[in-house]
Image: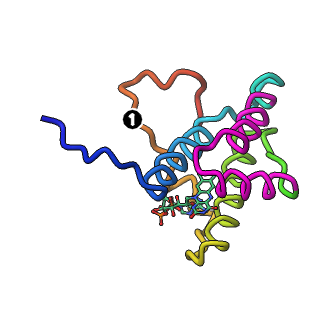
Amino acid sequence: KENWSGTVTKEELGRSTWTFLHTLAAQFPIRPTKQQQKDVKELMAIISRLYPCKTCAEHFKEILKTNPPKAKSGLDLVQWMCQVHNLVNKSLGKPQFRCEQAELRWGTFNCDGACDLHSRP
Ligand code: FAD
């Protein structure tokens, strides 16, 4: 039987969302299409409006104003995601993550051979 308590915490939501965002960045193509670049920008704007923790969403919106998404290549996106996560870390008094380790932390993804949206070398 599945064991759940029914309460999703802000921390749990945050960890899950960062897992999604960093994995997306790590799987993003080296040469994305214009549409894929536009999709990333829209996704970030939507998260800043709909993220179900109001103070987090408002905080993220402020971060995006001075740090617009960099999605010209997957490598840019990985670094940008790390930088914005570090800005959130800083505001929460959490340690800074070394962004040169971002590919190592998030670059491997096991999707049973079906991660064929795009290939990374
Ligand atoms: P998390 O910060 O969730 O990180 C998860 C894992 O990611 C870490 O264990 C580490 O391995 C890795 N990691 C850490 N930093 C980086 C990085 N820079 N680059 C790559 N990988 C990294 N909480 C609030 O209380 N107030 C807020 O305003 C707020 N804003 C948020 C905005 C967004 C968009 C998101 C997604 C979350 C926000 N959160 C906020 C939640 C917060 O960021 C954390 O997710 C939560 O506090 C749990 O922290 P954690 O220490 O478990 O690690």
User: Which residue is painted at 73% across and 34% down in the image?
Assistant: 40
Taking the image as shown, residue 99 lies to the left or right of residue 114, namely right
Quarter occupied by the N terminus = top left
> Residue 37's spot in the image, x, y percent?
79, 31
Location of residue 43 (image quadrant): top right
Task: State whether residue 6 is above or below residue 120.
Answer: below
Magenta region, main secondary structure: helix
User: Which residue is painted at 59% across and 51% down in the image?
Assistant: 53
Label 1: few (<14), some or many (≥20) within 10 Å? few
> Residue 27's spot in the image, x, y percent?
58, 36
Location of residue 85 (image quadrant): bottom right
Task: State whether residue 80 is above or below residue 95.
Answer: above
Give the residue type at disc 1: Asn
**Which residue lies most toward the right here?**
66
Of residues 68 and 116, which is closer to you in this image? 68
Of residues 18 and 32, which is closer to you in this image? 18
Quadrant hosting ligand 1? bottom right
Task: State whether residue 101 is above or below residue 46.
Answer: below
User: Which residue is painted at 78% across and 58% down in the image?
Assistant: 63
Of residues 100 and 25, which is closer to you in this image? 25
- The residue labelled by disc 1 is 110
Residue 49 on the magenta span:
yes
Tell me the magenta residue range.
Answer: 38-65
User: Which residue is painted at 26% across and 47% down in the image?
Assistant: 5
Residue 60 on the magenta span:
yes
> Residue 98's spot in the image, x, y percent?
60, 69
